[in-house]
Amino acid sequence: MRALLAEIGEIAEVKHYGRVFSVQGLVVEVAGPLHAMGVGSRLAVTNRLGEDVTCEVVGFRDNRALCLPFGSLSGIGVGCKAVLSSEEPHVYPSSAWLGRVVNAMGEPIDGKGPIGQGHEPYALRNTPPPAHTRQRVKGKVDLGVRALNTFTTCCRGQRMGIFAGSGVGKSVLLSMLARNTACDVAVIGLIGERGREVQEFIEDDLGPEGLARSVVVVATSDEPALMRRQAAYLTLALAEYFRDLDKDVLCMMDSVTRFAIAQREIGLSTGEPPTTKGYTPTVFAELPKLLERAGPGTGQGSITGLFTVLVDGDDHNEPVADAVRAILDGHIVMERAIAERGRYPAINVLKSVSRTMPDCNALDENALIRRARTLMATYSDMEELIRLGAYRAGSDPLVDEAIHYQPALEAYLAQRKDEASDLATGYAALAEILADKPVSEEIE
């Protein structure tokens, strides 16, 4: 009843409408009551077949509103009626959304019927909680992946980026995290995903148990830019709802890069000047607004964010990757060279950083990780000489030690897709590896 009364209260006394002035590419120019419109306003444009196509105002030019569609422009022409919607874009989430798959508009696409709506509206483009009112990031989160649990430990409410090129195993790692991470609720946004992979991810990677505690938001690569962008906003809005219920939420998004590409398409359509690699200024303005919504809340709930970044041409310093890395609380780097060696997940732990470490670890855990990193860094520095046979054993005791431990550490970092490893087991296994002294040290 409260939800119904809220909707009744939002009905405007006066209905504003305009007319389509022109259509250029994907941009629909609408002439009408500009005083009643603003950026983000929604219009229902009636095409020649009598069907309504929802459009969003993204800018203004020459006393006309520039709009982009959420659907197809087929049948829309000059003179078509455009009715202004009075309500702000929002969603009414509830616990009934768990186990469901929805599109960017919050409509179910899993064939399981309608979804029960909640009472409170949640704005799609919400603002993050004020910085001074948020709780501190605290308490480790078990991600179920050895390499991440030990070398890039993540805490509740932390935001981490997974940086990788195409085909390096980013989506598979995300599926492992979705299935194994210890959390109350998982909200998963598949932004610009391949249509073929959506069902595979839900059925094979997530599975019935993972889906039961999750909400999956899907916008495939063939959908309009507004749908792909809104899917990212909806993902965070749903995560905020469950966070406000004092739940620990895992929010995963694959990928932030496709959100940035969608925003670039929108910006270029409205005449924004392209900057580095064609990205418009609004891309770099929208990224922090989106990513800052994850994190600890003002109450007991939190949103732990894991966001994938598809680096262009394996360049980890390209504009979007560089901007996202500066916003997040850590980054996980996946490299093609490691994947080509057949070690999965292809995480380069030496280039990966968690900004909550070492404060979240005990002293003995930090000592263990430092020793393992030193050995791997030493081997990495001398790897070419070792492979060429140019290094003579005994020249450097630290290098000899690194060579001794390298096979065991490589095996430790590898993990099967269907395998889970908790925090305690990961540290115990690493300590066991480093307790195995080289033969030369045992003789001494």
Image: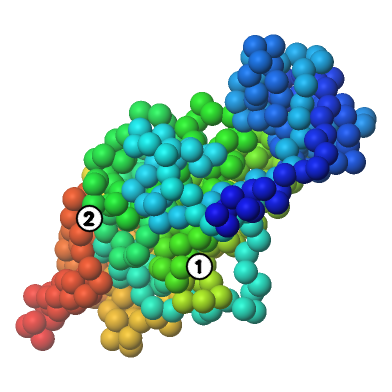
Q: Residue at x 34, y 65 (%)?
A: 183
Q: Which of 89 and 225 lies nearest the eye of the viewer?
A: 89
Asked which secondary structure carries label 2, the reply is loop
Viewer-nearest residue: 388 or 71 = 71
Work out whether residue 147 can be spotted.
no
Q: Is residue 355 above or below residue 315?
A: below
Quarter of the image for residue 248 reads bottom left
Taking 101 as reference, is 299 left or right? right
Q: Which mark is residue 160?
A: none
Q: Height in image: 73 above or below 94?
A: above
Image coordinates of residue 130 in percent, x first then y, are: 66, 72
Q: Which residue type carries mark 2?
A: Ala
Say which residue label 2 marks: 414
Image location of residue 118, percent across then percent down: 50, 54
Q: Name the N-terminal-most of marks 1 and 2.
A: 1
Circles 1 and 2 in contact, beta carbons < 8 Å = no
- x 21%, y 55%: residue: 415
Q: Is residue 239 left or right of residue 283?
A: left
Horizontal and vertical percent for residue 54? 66, 30
Taking 25 as reference, is 254 left or right? left
x and y percentages locating residue 176 in the rendered image: 28, 52
Please tell me whether mark 1 sits on a helix, a strand or a loop.
helix
Give the quarter of the figure containing the N terminus: bottom right
The amino acid type of the residue labelled 1 equals: Asp
Position of 69 relative to 322 (above/below) = above
Q: Residue at x 43, y 82 (%)?
A: 359
- Residues at marks 1 and 2, CA–CA distance in whole angstroms: 37 Å
**Which residue is labeled 1 in the image?**
244
Residue at image point 37% right, 60% down: 185
